[in-house]
Amino acid sequence: MITQIRQEKQTSGDPLTERIIGCCFRVHRELGPGFPEKIYTAALVMALRALGFSVEQERRFGVTFNGTTVGEFRIDVLVDQRVVVETKAVTGVMPKVFGDQVLAYLKAAGLPTGLLVNFGNASCQVRRLANSSAKSVSKSAESIEQSAKSVLRAR
């Protein structure tokens, strides 16, 4: 099965991602470039939680092939069980592989939306990516929990 995944414009009209993007710009405005990725991630998590978002760091998801778990990955930040936020601190042009990474995460997790955020340059860069094959706007907390439990059992 071929999964249709597309990149959307940054201003999508989605209030959730727009608020997350606002937090990203606020973090960058205050910290500026030059710190390691984990500093920006921690600051972003703090800013998102201050706005009342449900935020998880380093959330694990399993990757299956022919019905068998073949590995796992961790996303930097999961917001409100719906939006993957992958943070980077890269100077210059971000390699295409980072966008591909977010798209793969969306596909494997069955989630609809991802943000790729680069804090490494003089201005914050955000790319919004969408998994158009996600069956619903949000995956239920219960099914995400099942995914996490199956990964832990596979270990």
Image (spheres, grey):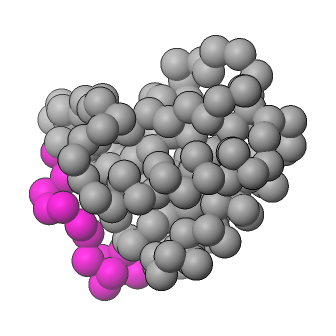
Tell me if residue 32 is in the magenta stretch: no
Which image quadrant for residue 69? bottom left
Is residue 1 shown left or right of residue 29?
A: left
Q: Residue 98 in the image: x percent, y percent?
A: 55, 30
Asked if 47 appears above or below 107 in the picture, the reply is below
- Please name the residue shown 16% across and 45% down the image: 133
Which residue is nearer to you in this view: 19 or 35? 19
Task: Reply above or below: 90 against 119.
Answer: above
The answer to whether 124 appears left or right of 65 in the picture is right
Name the residue located 41 percent from the left edge and 59 percent from the top edge.
19
Q: Residue at x 38, y 71 (%)?
A: 81
* Quadrant into which the N terminus falls: top left
Which residue corresponds to the image point at 18% horizontal and 32% vertical from the top-left? 4
Q: Which residues are magenta?
A: 133-147
Give x and y (percent) for residue 116. Answer: 51, 39
**Image quarter of residue 76:** bottom right
Residue 77 in the image: x percent, y percent? 56, 61
- Please give the count of numbered marks on the rendered protein: 0
* Location of residue 43 with respect to 51 vertically, above or below: above
Q: Where does the image place residue 155, in percent across and percent down from the top left?
A: 62, 70
Image position of 139 with respect to 14: above or below = below
